[in-house]
Image: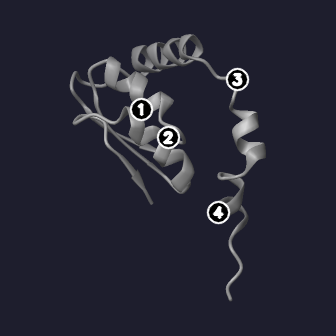
C-alpha cells in the first residue's frame, strides 16, 4: 500500500486546525482589503483560492464582489467550507 505524502495528513490533522483556530473575521477582512488594494483585481474577477482550508479567505473575497472557487486537499476542511457555500463561492475537494 502506498504511503501518503506528509501534506495529505498534515492539512487534516488536529495540529493544523489548532494552528489556524485563532484566525478571526476582522483579521481576515483586513488582510483581504490590503491584498485587493495592492493587486487591484478587476471588479467581479474570477478567483481560485487554492489550499482554501475552511474557506474563510474565499468567503471574505466574495464579500468584496469576486467570484471565488475554493479547493483544498482536506475533505474535512472542505466539508466545513461547504456550509457557507454560495452560487458565487463553491468549494471543491481536490
Q: Quadrant of the C terminus?
A: bottom left
Q: Is residue 11 above or below residue 45?
A: below
Give the number of the mark in front: 2 or 1. 2
- Alpha carbon distance from label 4 to label 2: 17 Å
For marks 4 and 2, the one nearer the N-term is 4
* Res. 8 mark: 4
Q: Nearer the N terminus, badge 3 or badge 4?
A: 4
Please report contact status of discs 4 and 2: CB closer than 8 Å, yes or no. no
Q: Is residue 40 above or below residue 12?
A: above
Q: Nearer the viewer, residue 89 or 84?
A: 84
As helix, strand or loop, the secondary structure at mark 4 comes to: helix
Q: Position of residue 80 (x, y in %)?
A: 49, 40
CA–CA distance in space, label 2 to label 1: 13 Å
Which is more foreground, mark 3 or mark 1? 3
At label 1, counting other C-alpha atoms closer than 10 Å, the crowd grade (few under 14, some 14-19, many 20 or more) is: many
Asked whether disc 3 touches disc 2, contact meaning CB atoms under 8 Å apart, the reply is: no
| The residue positioned farthest toward the bottom in the image shown | 1
Classify mark 4: residues with Cα within 10 Å, few (<14), some (14-19) or many (20+): few
Residue indicated by mark 2? 80
Q: Residue sitting at 64 percent across and 62 percent down? A: 8
Q: Quick check: 9 left or right of 80?
A: right
Whichever of labels 2 and 1 marks the residue nearer the N terminus, that label is: 1
Query: What is the x, y in percent for residue 45?
Result: 24, 31
Q: Closer to the observer: label 3 or label 2?
A: 2
Residue in view at x 33 percent, y 18 percent:
63
Check disc 3 and report the residue beneath it: 22
Residue displayed at 75% across by 36% down: 18
x 52%, y 38%: residue: 54
Q: Examine the image and state in which quarter residue 28 appears.
A: top right
Q: Residue 55, image x and y in percent?
A: 47, 35
Q: Are marks 3 and 1 in contact (CB under 8 Å)?
A: no
Please, what secondary structure does the residue beneath circle 3 have? loop
Amino acid at each position: 500500500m502506498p504511503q501518503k505524502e506528509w501534506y495529505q495528513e498534515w492539512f487534516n490533522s488536529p495540529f493544523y486546525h489548532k494552528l489556524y483556530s485563532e484566525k478571526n473575521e476582522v483579521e481576515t477582512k483586513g488582510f483581504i482589503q490590503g491584498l485587493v488594494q495592492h493587486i487591484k483585481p478587476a471588479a467581479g474577477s474570477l478567483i481560485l483560492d487554492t489550499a482554501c482550508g475552511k474557506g474563510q479567505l474565499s468567503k471574505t473575497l466574495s464579500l468584496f464582489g469576486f467570484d471565488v472557487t475554493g479547493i483544498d486537499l482536506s475533505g474535512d476542511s472542505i466539508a466545513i467550507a461547504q456550509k457557507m457555500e454560495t452560487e458565487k463561492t463553491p468549494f471543491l475537494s481536490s
